Amino acid sequence: MEIPYTVEAHPETGLNNGKIGIWLFLTSEVMLFGALFATFIMLRIGSDGNWAAMQAEAELNIPLATLNTAVLIASSLTMVMAWASLMRGQLGRFKLFGWATVGCGGIFLVIKYFEYTAKFEHHHYPESNTFLAIYFAMTGLHALHVIGGMAWNAYFTGPGSKLFHTNRQWLTDRVEHSGLFWHFVDLVWIFLFPVFYLL
Amino acid sequence: MSEHVDIDKQVRIYFLVFGALMVGTAATVGAYYLEVSVPVALTIGLFIASVKASLVACFFMHLIDEKKIIYWTLALTVAFFIALMALPLLTSVADQVGEFAEVEAHEPH
């Protein structure tokens, strides 16, 4: 049985099913991270003025986090360039930018690994204080999203790219949808970075 | 994203947005080293983050040229998100009102 509206637009929505599906998924993600940001606000308000002391005790590495921000922004650029390459019908360039996106995700995780291990070496764990608890919860969940996005992009750049020869538009749409997820992950980090490291 | 796009123009915009995001990141870090009060620092930091997030959403996620159904879906999400963010603030206000009422009740008239 053929699944309808995978490439052509649904007459009711004007969009293919994949586009609707990914946006609905992203709205649920907004609420997931929204709940955690609301938790963050509650913890900060309820910390009786101890927040700055807990934040200082955590000794977060601002230069490394700034580098990670730049890496994620660069990965968003390579992601849209991968999609633009498919729009131009350039499979080779699509693969180049696709793997660059996956590579940037890998660099982000390696830097995060160094950040986390530095915390553990100083015996800073989620149970150490409220700040570290919400820090590890939110940045950890974000890192899981980065891993998910890398797996998704690696599939379309690798084995999934065979679709280019049989249904190029479908592959282009799929890459646009995976890009929407990837940009959302970047967008979440844009708020996590100042909230935890700078404010 | 609409079906008919000038991809060369799009790519130029992507690079401009990338530059703006990098400048925004530098500005966020720069603002950290300004000696300002916490509320001012919070305002500056969250304002820059919101501008950066808008750039990502509008241009990288193509929201600037999207179908109405996506806008309506996101408008609903934003409404629920604002309600979610307001909850902790309302809780805080309710606590303060409760404390005030308690003090009032114990004061001799």
Image (cartoon, helix red, strand yellow):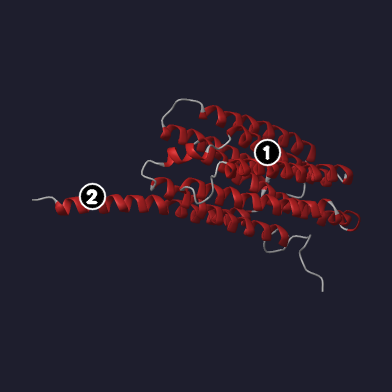
Residue at the left extreme of this rendering: B109
Q: Is residue A100 visible?
A: yes
- Number of the label disc, if any, that sits on residue A73: 1
Asked if disc 1 and disc 2 are in contact, CB closer than 8 Å, the reply is no
Residue in the image at 58% along x and 42% along y: A119
- Percent from the top left, x then y, of residue A36? 51, 53
Image mark count: 2
Residue at the bottom extreme of this rendering: A1
Q: SS of the residue at dot 2? A: helix
Q: Is residue A81 left or right of residue A144?
A: right
- Percent from the top left, x then y, of residue B4? 77, 47
> Vertically, is B3 above or below B28?
below
Chain under numbered label 2: B
Q: Is residue A91 left or right of residue A23?
A: right
Circle 1 residues within 10 Å: few <14, some 14–19, many ≥20: many
**Pointer 2: what residue?**
B100
Residue type at mark 2: give it: Phe
- Percent from the top left, x then y, of residue A193? 57, 40
Q: Is residue B5 visible?
A: no
Q: Are marks 1 and 2 on the same chain?
A: no
Q: Nearer the viewer, residue B20 or B9?
A: B20
Q: Quadrant of residue B11?
A: top right
Q: Nearer the viewer, residue B55 or A161?
A: A161
Residue type at mark 1: give it: Ile
Chain under numbered label 1: A
Q: Is residue A22 left or right of residue B104?
A: right
Q: Distance of mark 1 from mark 2, alpha carbons? A: 47 Å
Residue in the image at 83% along x and 43% along y: A85
- Number of the label disc, if any, that sits on residue A138: none
